Image (cartoon, coloured by chain):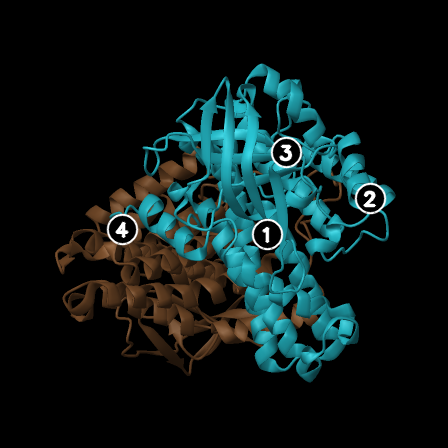
Chain colours: A brown, B cyan
Amino acid sequence: MDFTFTPEQEALREQAREFLAANPEPTWVQLAELGWTGVSIAEEDGGAGLTFVEEAVLFEELGRTLYHGPYFATIGLALPALPSELRAEVAAGEASWTLALGPLVPDLDTAERVAIVGGDGIYELEDGEREVLATTDESRPLGVVRGGDRGRRLADSTVLAEIEARSQTALALEACGLARLALEDALEYASSREQFGKKIGVYQAVSHPLADAYTRVELSRSLALWAAWCVAIGDPQAAIAAAAAKSYAGESAVAVCETAIQSLGGIGFTWEHRLHRLYKRALGIESFGASGTRLRAEVAAALVEGEVPGLSQTPDSVPVTQGG
Amino acid sequence: MDLRDTLEEAAFRAELRAWLEENLPAGLQGHRGGATRFEGPEMREWSRALYAAGYIGLTWPEEYGGGGAPYTHQAIFLEEMARAEAPPHIGVIGIGMAGPTIIAHGTDEQKGRYLAPLLSAEEIWCQGFSEPGAGSDLAGVRTSARQENGHFVVSGQKVWSSFAHIADFCILLTRSDPESTRHAGLTYLIVDMHAPGVEVRGLRQITGEAEFNEIFFDDVHVPAENLLGDVGSGWQVAMTTLLHERGTLGFALQATLEVQIRKLIALAQDRGANQLQRDRIAREWIEMQGLRYTNYRSLSALMKTGTPGPEGSISKLVWSEANQRVTKLALEILGPDAALGDENAPYGGYWQYQQLRSRGNTIEAGTSEVLRNIVAERVLGLPYSR
């Protein structure tokens, strides 16, 4: 058992943090040049042949900076449906995608191509009309597609389970990244702002909610990274782990942002401070796809009526299970 | 990152699981804990069996009777014990607190004298830290240790001491310098609980039973060789003890919570649960999984760097509040029957007992208020409130 990142993964995080600080609005081509669009795409298709764990590092960092672009839609949503040569285009930065899983389609303003679910398969949308809608979270516009035809058949609908797990986990990771930043903002403020002659972080009415926010951030991260690892190796727990991660991290990011806004007082309530943008992304993540309540209904069904699969066995098939 | 067992860990787990299946007495499986674990010889026999099989003191150095194994083995041990619903070794204070403190600060003679019988459950230890006037604020300790003719004379009162009524030894924090205040002038002693002048009185708790005790010391003679660390350095020694209390407990806590939630799910299957209750069941299971992997992250950091990750500091806080919610949810699922006590209650009164007992979880071994202060000040770097 090893739940740490490799030095290469840590270096990727560092690269991402530095790059996004210098380039808060990167283009798709820039991301491709960094190799980010091809992380988990096979080497023969022009990718790096790595896994979803490396992509997880990027989702966390992209969530932190409220990246506006088609990375989630392409890598978190559409990628499992794309055949080899279309993946090669993604890796090369020549194409970005989004997938209409429900009526509201993410990143429709920036994704070049659109996939739709129809009958027993996933198809490329041809000649459809796109409308980008006004959304509370301006960093991730949603849209609707109308009309158009089923174009090329991309994948069988059996791939949807993987897409669900990937997308829920990706959103959980984004939620972790932005919640951590909201907590950092609140900690910085509570450590410097003085009232009644003391730093406000001295008061337990301020510090204890921040300790609880930290707890939520860490539990969220543990769940999201567990889910990411399950997705990466195709573990049978991937579906329930992703549902657990998205429900907990989504709701927690909202709660952590609310604690941060309260900690900053009036400043936290202004348009000028970035907290409201983090908060709106958190709300967007929570409501996208299935909310925490809906995901917990699925988890409860698995726990009470069904069966929760054990974690994967060791490579040589020695039986391994978790503590329960 | 690989959450699977290594081959070597998997082999250890398989061997342990087989051993538990073979050796755990049916009467002890699913033992509800509490004061009943002190009755009869079964718990000591079980503890001895665990020791004889090499599962106690797994991570201790081999020279002190330990297994010299990595921390991951200890984590697997706790997971598998919980999975089998096996009760823990009865000497939890000795193994979790006294032993590690003696290894860190003890003399060779002390290590030779105390460590082996502590592992084998031949000798039971208790902890004498809290006092009527020193709870969360431990530096208020007043129990005195006078130095007299080459020994210490101890007088005072300790409280909330589990196991004291069956204990052979006590790790005792005393004030050796009567002029001193706060963290200075404290001295850490090993006290023979059978010595003249030691009196133990049970404290009946919210569940109706007495798991912990008051200890009264009336001019108790403690030989000089029972000093642990230096005279006046008791605070530093005590911090080693408390570090172990909070540092190694995470896996045990998560594992017991997992058992509790498994029983909660069985209850929901048995009695039915409405949508709101099902939502809460899922919520608790999810948070328990979060706690599991938080412990894994902290343990992985410990294995790689020698220091547990800061996220490990939330384990006890998260577990204690979760256990309170889980047991209360069970009462809610029981409905009106939740009002029935003991033998009239469904499932032998398991949930009624667990729910009441859980109220102590946020008080014992560091209150939730103190733990939040620790997270705020030491992990998050907020300004100190004192």
Residue A128: percent from left, percent from top: 39, 78
Determine if marks 4 and 2 fall on one subunit: yes
**Observer-nearest residue: B258 or B60?**
B60
Label 4 marks a residue whose chain is B
Mark 1 residue type: Gln
Q: Classify mark 3: helix, strand or loop.
A: loop
Q: Are marks 1 and 2 in contact (CB under 8 Å)?
A: no
User: In the rendered structure, which disc, 1 or 3, sits on the residue that comes first in sequence?
Assistant: 3
Tell me what residue is drawn at x 28 percent, y 61 percent: A206
Q: Classify mark 4: helix, strand or loop.
A: loop
Label 3 marks a residue whose chain is B
Instruction: Please rate how many residues cluster around mark 4, counting C-alpha atoms within 10 Å: few if below 14, some from 14 to 19, many from 20.
Output: some
Mark 1–mark 2 distance (CA, rounded to whole Å): 28 Å
Residue ID for mark 2 = B41
Residue B24: percent from left, percent from top: 83, 45
Mark 4–mark 3 distance (CA, rounded to whole Å): 42 Å
Mark 3 residue type: Pro
Determine if marks 1 and 4 fall on one subunit: yes
Mark 1–mark 4 distance (CA, rounded to whole Å): 30 Å
Determine if marks 1 and 3 fall on one subunit: yes
Determine if marks 3 and 2 fall on one subunit: yes
User: In the rendered structure, which disc, 1 or 4, sits on the residue that comes first in sequence?
Assistant: 1
Instruction: Please rate how many residues cluster around mark 1, counting C-alpha atoms within 10 Å: few if below 14, some from 14 to 19, many from 20.
Output: many
